[in-house]
């Protein structure tokens, strides 16, 4: 049966369709639905029939634009507005900066800032090794937060550690996606690591990064590194920077 036809009959009764005909069609549709459901149950119960396996995350796919997942979680009440401390680091000499008043200031080699959960931020990276004068403008989308002890939030930020390979791939025109997750405490590797240490897990291009991170812990951020540059038309800059979401600077004490 065509669902559109059933919907039309159930919402409006044309003069050439009687109630008996509509009821007959509805019963036939229910009977067919039960037959299909029974066939699925039989196949699932048969050990010789393998169950379908999906490699995709139930809430996210790569075709979604940045920001959809974070805003969806805010709308569902899964996340509350919060400025999450985030720390940026990369190869020696690289500098990071966030847009402020429509422009970028002097970059910092170890930038830390409070970013709003559910927002998308585009930041700038300069001083890339073996690429004099080159700049990249990745995005970071916060889809979760950490729950550090009160007063220690800036001691345990979300680390965004980018490698020279990541930056070179972006300069070559490729898109690198990094999903940052909190390890499951029951299966986490008991290693003492610094904030700037990085142990990325590289996966094949056909494997879902979000689903992989979800199986290992709790995803909290998505970083996308590509070759996009700011538009020449100033009127398009708010769209490029996702509306300039607010962020809070975090000043770190200088080492003695």
Image: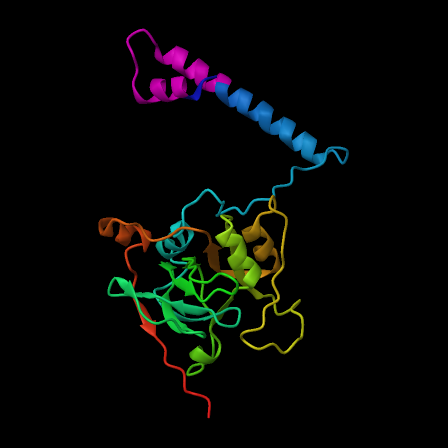
Any part of residue 83 in sight? no
Considering every residue shown, the one lying at the far right of the view is 48
Does 65 sit left or right of 187 as displayed? left
Q: Position of residue 36 (x, y in %)?
A: 59, 25
* Image position of 155 (left or right of 236): right
Above or below for 28 versus 57: above
Residue at 36% from the left image edge and 77% from the top image edge = 250
Q: At which x and y percent is residue 84? A: 40, 70
Q: Residue at point 38% right, 72% down? A: 113
State yes or no: residue 15 in magenta.
yes
Q: Could you say which quadrant of the image residue 166 lies in?
A: bottom right
Q: Residue at x 60, y 53 (%)?
A: 212
Of all residues shown, which one is farthest toward the left?
A: 235
Q: Is residue 132 left or right of residue 103?
A: right
Tell me the residue at 68%/35% (across/down).
44
User: Residue 13 location, x and y as percent?
Assistant: 30, 15
Magenta stretch, residue numbers: 4-28
Q: How many marks?
A: 0
Report the predominant secondary structure element of the magenta stretch: helix
Residue 115 visible from this viewpoint: yes
**Coloring applied to the structure:** rainbow
Residue 252 rendering spot, x and y as whole percentages? 40, 82
Q: Is residue 70 above or below residue 37?
A: below
Q: Residue furthest top?
A: 16
In this rendered view, identify the residue nearer to me: 2 or 70: 70
Judging depth in this view, the residue of 130 and 248 nearest the camera is 130
The answer to whether residue 45 is magenta is: no
The quarter of the displayed image where residue 24 is located? top left
């Amino acid at each position: 049966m065509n669902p559109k036809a059933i919907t039309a009959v159930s919402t409006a009764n044309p003069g050439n369709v009687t109630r008996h005909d509509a009821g007959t069609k509805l019963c036939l549709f229910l009977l067919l639905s039960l037959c299909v459901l029974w066939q699925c149950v039989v196949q699932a119960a048969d050990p010789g029939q393998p169950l379908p396996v999906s490699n995709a995350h139930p809430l996210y796919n790569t075709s979604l634009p940045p920001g959809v997942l974070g805003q969806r979680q805010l709308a569902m009440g899964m996340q509350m507005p919060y400025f999450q401390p985030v720390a940026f680091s990369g190869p020696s000499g690289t500098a990071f900066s966030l847009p402020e008043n429509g422009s970028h200031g002097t970059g910092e080699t170890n930038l830390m800032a409070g970013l709003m959960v559910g927002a998308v931020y585009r930041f700038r990276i300069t001083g890339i090794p073996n690429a004099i004068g080159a700049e990249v403008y990745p995005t970071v989308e916060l889809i979760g937060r950490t729950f550090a002890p009160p007063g220690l939030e800036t001691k345990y930020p979300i680390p965004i550690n980018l490698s020279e390979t990541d930056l070179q791939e972006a300069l070559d025109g490729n898109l690198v996606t990094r999903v940052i997750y909190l390890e499951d405490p029951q299966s986490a590797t008991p290693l003492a690591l610094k904030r700037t240490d990085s142990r990325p897990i590289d996966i094949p291009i056909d494997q879902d990064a979000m689903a992989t991170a979800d199986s290992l812990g709790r995803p909290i951020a998505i970083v996308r590194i590509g070759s996009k540059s700011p538009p020449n038309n100033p009127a398009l800059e708010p769209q490029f920077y996702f509306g300039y979401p607010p962020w809070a600077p975090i000043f770190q004490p200088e080492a003695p």
